[in-house]
Image: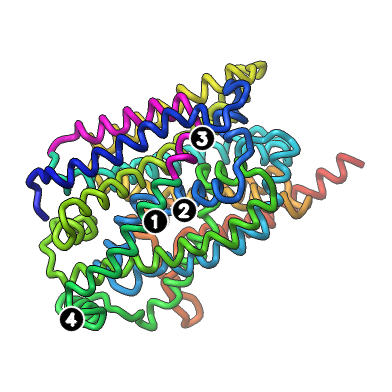
Amino acid sequence: MKTDLNIPALAVFIFFFALVTVMGFMAARWQQPKSMASLDEWGLGGRQFGTWITWFLVGGDFYTAYTVIAVPALVYSVGAYGFFALPYTIIVYPFVFLVMPRLWQVAKDNGYVTAADVVHGRYASRTLEAAVAITGVLATMPYIALQLIGMAAAIKALGFEGEWPLVAAFVVLALYTYSSGLRAPALIAFVKDIMIYIVVLTAVSFIPGKLGGYGAVFTAAEEAFKAKGSGGILLQPDQYVAYASLALGSALAAFMYPHTLTGIFASRSATTIRKNAALLPAYTLMLGLLALLGYMGHAAHLKLTSNNDVVPALFQTLFPDWFAGFAFAALAIGALVPAAVMSIGASNLFTRNFWKAYVNPAVTPKQEAGVAKITSLVVKFGALLVIIYLPTQFALDLQLLGGLWILQTLPALIFGLFTRWFTAPALLAGWVVGLVGGTYVTWTDGLKPLHLVSAAGFSATVYVGLLALAANIIVACVVNLLVRPKQVTQAA
């Protein structure tokens, strides 16, 4: 990949980055409330986002800059296996349609801002609330760092060296998020998503023609995988279970993250959420087209130092300079939206479920908003330090564990919406077993997301997060059977 400073691309990049910066600061005046001095307004946009705003916002923080970089990179590396993101997004939307409106209603009726608020309200357990909150913050931090990796790939392709452009971009992000709260990424998401759609549709229409058509692209990819001795454009039978379990586990985890739940809680109504569950699959179509760029990287015979460079290198090699600048701006802006929402989600958790719960129970709404603003700055700064001072692989490994961890909050958050059977001690025991056991298995496997399971002559490779969730639920059920009769007896 070329690293010379590309002036035409840089000019286009700066124009669009400046545009969204101005929009970010103007967002404080968009649908301006009487006061921003509350978490409802700063952290959830007043819970007034309608169908289109929610669609762009949830899509913006679900399909991130790192998604644009990582999915084609995975397809470039392993082939068809990298397409697991498609069934995962198909599975997740029925889940959103059925479950999230009920969660939204509970949060709306009780003034809850975070998942941990919901858990505490249902089970009246500070310990279980803290477990969910800690998991959410820990899982979110490396996710923010991954957005920086996506932005760094775009900045590197423009020809910049050093960390200062990345630092400057996130200083800007921190400032307008501080002043405008969730309204900033919600407004910017309009521009970001339109730009990403333009880039992806142009790429899948324009690039194959440069490479001899899709037939030549698939042939070149298959030959490259054969030469490497691994991967392929079709799944192998021994990959079916691993592929399916990774898709299912990822789907169940996706809307447990603080940033995706923030988009849900900020919606105007349960109907808005159901409409979005019907409309969001349009992003899945885009994701499928985007993944094909991994195959195109083989057909273009790119010389890469990292698989994550495949998309920037394609744009840099095959697009005119001005459009490459537009594409890199889309990638960079695609990092700003989810990073902002993630930092807001994490700061909401800290403010409500640590600061208010343990430090200052009498905190006022204005003070809550102030604590959340400062926390959001600290979260972004922490993610920036991870990228600057620690190896990129560290953030990738932590994000892998983060997906496993956040999945273990599902029973505590979701089961209580539909049944009163589970108790807090049972769910807490399940959470401990799932989180500790899943982390241990992942660690002993060399931080791999899949684990070989063998029993009674059957063996299959399964996503560790799903195995940990199964253990979590089983333990919760067993402990509940032991604890619940005692509680019933005491109540009598």
Quarter occupied by residue 105? top right
**Observer able to see residue 304:** yes
Query: Any mark on residue 442, and which?
Result: 1
Counting from the top left corner in percent of width and height, residue 240 is at: 43, 78
Circles 2 and 1, Cβ within 8 Å, touching? The answer is yes
Tag 3 or tag 2, which sits nearer the N-term?
A: 3
Counting from the top left corner in percent of width and height, residue 352 is at: 60, 28
Image quarter in which the N terminus is found: bottom left
Q: Residue at x 61, y 26 (%)?
A: 33
Magenta span covers which residues?
161-189
Q: Which residue is mark 4?
A: 223
**Observer able to see residue 479:** no
Give how far apart the Cα atoms at labels 2 and 4 are. 34 Å
Provide the secondary structure element on which disc 4 rests: helix
Callout 1, which amino acid?
Thr
Give how far apart the Cα atoms at labels 4 and 3 are. 47 Å
Circles 4 and 3, Cβ within 8 Å, touching? The answer is no
Task: Give the number of marks.
Answer: 4
Counting from the top left corner in percent of width and height, residue 209 is at: 21, 74
Tag 4 or tag 1, which sits nearer the N-term?
A: 4
Tag 3 or tag 4, which sits nearer the N-term?
A: 3
Q: Residue at x 65, y 52 (%)?
A: 100
Callout 4, which amino acid?
Glu
Residue 369 in the figure: left or right of residue 141: right
Callout 2, which amino acid?
Leu
Q: Which residue is mark 3?
A: 182
Q: Nearer the viewer, residue 394 or 168?
A: 168
Image quarter in which the C terminus is found: top right
Provide the secondary structure element on which disc 3 rests: loop
